[in-house]
């Protein structure tokens, strides 16, 4: 379980500020994902990455930016945070040959935008 | 577009009673379905997947393409089964998981 970590675990920020959530995995997994979890919506995919320097939009990408310069890191940036981005954010990863396409999830970051 | 529906937000059962968590999906392609579970203060983790036809912790789920369902079942609920359960559909070449809204299972003594 320690293979994928997220930081910070809790963050409070103000509307309009830039916030970066970090995700790090030690398995050298090719694929990494960002989800947000909201009541009534379950988890929704924000962005994903198939490899370093390859990213693609998910279901709810607006207001978010990602980068992947190294395989092990996949930061998520809120360029100008809004109250609607208050949520719990989960990072996940999977390997190229992971059985049955199983994704492994991080512990989550609880973000509050005031 | 694909969609996963879990009609129950909360399901409360007594210990030893049967459990059925409902999941219906909408997808034009060949579905690949999963159940993920999140226990209190723990990470989201895979419980089972339809393609492997396995039983994990006494839970089973059968894909019914005619009814577009993938309900999760357990004959006798245990207290440790209390958790949030998410049904998920994999598309996009294995890169896009679409989750349902989740069902909170509470097993009472």
Image (cartoon, coloured by chain):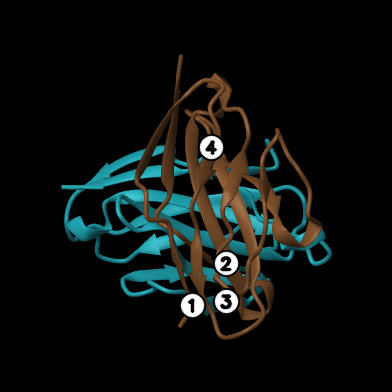
Chain colours: A cyan, B brown
Q: Is residue B24 visible?
A: yes
Q: Chain of mark 2?
A: B
**Residue at point 57% right, 67% down?**
B89
Q: Residue at x 50, y 69 (%)?
A: B25
Assign a secondary structure to mark 2: strand
Q: Give yes or no for contact between labels 3 and 1 (Cβ–Cβ under 8 Å).
A: no
Under circle 3, the secondary element is strand
| Dot 4 alpha-carbon crowd within 10 angstroms: few under 14, some 14 to 19, many 20 or more | many
Quadrant location of the N terminus of chain B in the rendered image: bottom left
What residue is shown with label 3?
Answer: A55
Both marks 2 and 1 on one chain:
yes
Question: What whole-number distance in Å separates the C-alpha atoms at marks 3 and 2?
Answer: 21 Å
Q: In this view of the protein, which residue sits in the foreground, B68 or A48?
A: B68
Q: Which mark is residue B2?
A: 1
Q: Position of residue B70 (x, y in %)?
A: 59, 59
Chain that bears disc 1:
B
Residue A75 image position (x, y, % from top left): 51, 59
Q: Can you tell which of label 2 and label 4 is closer to the viewer?
A: 4
Q: Chain of mark 3?
A: A
Disc 4 is attached to a residue of which chain? B
A110 displayed left or right of A68 = left
Mark 3–mark 1 Cα distance, whole angstroms, equals 21 Å
Does A71 sit above or below residue B1?
Answer: above
Q: Residue at x 23, y 57 (%)?
A: A17
- Residue named by callout 2: B89
Identify the disc placed on residue A56. Answer: none
x and y percent of residue A109 in the render?
Answer: 42, 43
Labels 4 and 3 share a subunit = no
- Residue tagged 4: B19
């Amino acid at each position: 379980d320690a293979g994928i970590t997220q930081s910070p675990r809790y963050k409070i920020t103000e509307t309009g500020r830039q916030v970066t959530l970090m995700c790090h995995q030690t398995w050298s997994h090719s694929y990494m994902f960002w989800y947000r979890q909201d009541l009534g919506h379950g988890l929704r995919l924000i962005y994903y990455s198939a490899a370093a320097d390859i990213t693609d939009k998910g279901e709810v990408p607006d207001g978010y930016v990602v980068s992947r310069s190294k395989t092990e890191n996949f930061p998520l940036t809120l360029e100008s945070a809004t109250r609607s981005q208050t949520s719990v954010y989960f990072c996940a990863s999977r390997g190229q040959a992971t059985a049955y396409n199983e994704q492994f999830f991080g512990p989550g970051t609880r973000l509050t935008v005031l | 577009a694909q969609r996963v529906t879990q009609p129950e937000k909360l399901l409360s059962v007594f210990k030893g009673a049967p459990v059925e968590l409902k999941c219906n999906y909408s997808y034009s392609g060949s579905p690949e379905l999963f159940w993920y579970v999140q226990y209190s203060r723990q990470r989201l983790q895979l419980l089972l997947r339809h393609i492997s036809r396995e039983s994990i912790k006494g839970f089973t789920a059968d894909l019914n393409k005619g009814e577009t369902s993938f309900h999760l079942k357990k004959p006798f609920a245990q207290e440790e089964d209390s958790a949030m359960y998410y049904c998920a559909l994999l598309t996009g070449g294995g890169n896009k998981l679409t989750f349902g809204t989740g069902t909170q299972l509470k097993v009472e003594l």
